[in-house]
């Protein structure tokens, strides 16, 4: 009898196995939606803000639908996220290109490589809050950047932890390429739990 109850609980809609399967499905599908929404490259920021829009609702335990809410977040945040995402994508791409180019030029340019790495780290640090903020509030371009910068350094432990998580997942994906099917959405989900703890202190919505 006890064994039957355990098995019934395990496979019920409230059971851990069902919840795990739902989590895997949502992570995969949101990662796919993010990829599709990012295909023009310059819309990576728009897709990312839409991802945080969905996960923000999930973490705050609001009702959500991964498809309709992703599309809603994509449309509502398009004007805000497009220019910011495009600028970040260009700066990161240029800095990464410079690192590889400088690496071929010898050790005399190590300091320049270090400078490029510093720029990348700063961009990633500020980006921790940029897209979750866009997903939650409507601000001007300069206000989003300013507030993201303030939050990143005021809550430096959370922002550096999020960047460290991103780097760790990138390295894991290089080791296990199949994880690319979950990579972006998994990072967004985990980081949202950190970020929402900060945002709820300032945003009462």
Image: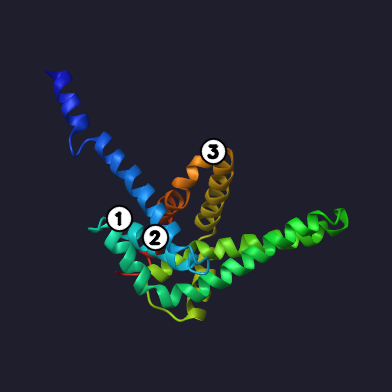
- Residue 155 position, x and y percent, is 50, 61
Q: Is residue 72 left or right of residue 192?
A: left
Please determine whether, in this image, residue 52 is positioned above or below residue 183: below
Alpha-carbon span between mark 1 and mark 3: 27 Å
Query: What label sits on residue 176 in the rendered view?
Result: 3
Circles 2, 3 touching at the beta carbon (< 8 Å): no
Q: Could you tell me which secondary element the residue under label 1 belongs to?
A: helix
Query: What label sits on residue 68 in the rendered view?
Result: none
- Check disc 1 and report the residue beneath it: 58
N-terminal of the pair, mark 2 or mark 3, is 2
The quadrant in which the N terminus is found is top left
- Check disc 2 and report the residue beneath it: 51
Q: Is residue 202 visible?
A: no
Name the mark nearer the viewer: 2 or 3: 3
Question: Which scheme is used to colour this image of the protein?
Answer: rainbow
Q: Residues within 10 Å of mark 2 (few under 14, many from 20)?
A: many
Picture quadrant of residue 88: bottom right
Picture quadrant of residue 195: bottom left
N-terminal of the pair, mark 1 or mark 2, is 2
For image coordinates 58% across by 38% down, the residue present is: 175
Please determine whether, in this image, residue 1 is positioned above or below residue 178: above
Q: Residues within 10 Å of mark 1 (few under 14, many from 20)?
A: some
N-terminal of the pair, mark 1 or mark 3, is 1
Q: Nearer the viewer, residue 22 or 199?
A: 22
Q: Could you tell me which secondary element the residue under label 2 belongs to?
A: helix
Q: Could you tell me which secondary element the residue under label 3 belongs to?
A: loop
Alpha-carbon span between mark 1 and mark 2: 11 Å
């Amino acid at each position: 009898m006890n064994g039957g109850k355990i098995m019934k609980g395990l496979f019920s809609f409230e059971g851990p196995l069902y919840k795990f399967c739902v989590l895997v499905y949502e992570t995969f599908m949101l990662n796919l939606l993010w990829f599709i929404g990012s295909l023009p490259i310059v819309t990576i920021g728009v897709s990312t803000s839409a991802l945080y829009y969905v996960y923000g609702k999930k973490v705050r335990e609001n009702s959500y639908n991964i498809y309709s809410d992703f599309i809603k977040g994509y449309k509502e945040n398009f004007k805000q996220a497009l220019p910011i995402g495009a600028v970040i994508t260009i700066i990161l791409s240029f800095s990464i290109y410079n690192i590889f180019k400088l690496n071929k030029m010898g050790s005399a340019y190590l300091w320049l490589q270090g400078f490029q790495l510093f720029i990348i780290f700063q961009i990633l640090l500020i980006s921790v809050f940029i897209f979750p903020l866009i997903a939650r509030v409507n601000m001007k371009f300069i206000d989003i950047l300013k507030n993201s910068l303030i939050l990143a350094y005021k809550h430096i432990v959370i922002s550096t932890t999020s960047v460290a998580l991103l780097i760790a997942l990138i390295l894991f994906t290089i080791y296990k390429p199949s994880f690319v099917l979950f990579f972006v959405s998994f990072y967004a989900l985990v980081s949202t739990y950190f970020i929402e703890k900060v945002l709820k202190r300032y945003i009462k919505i």
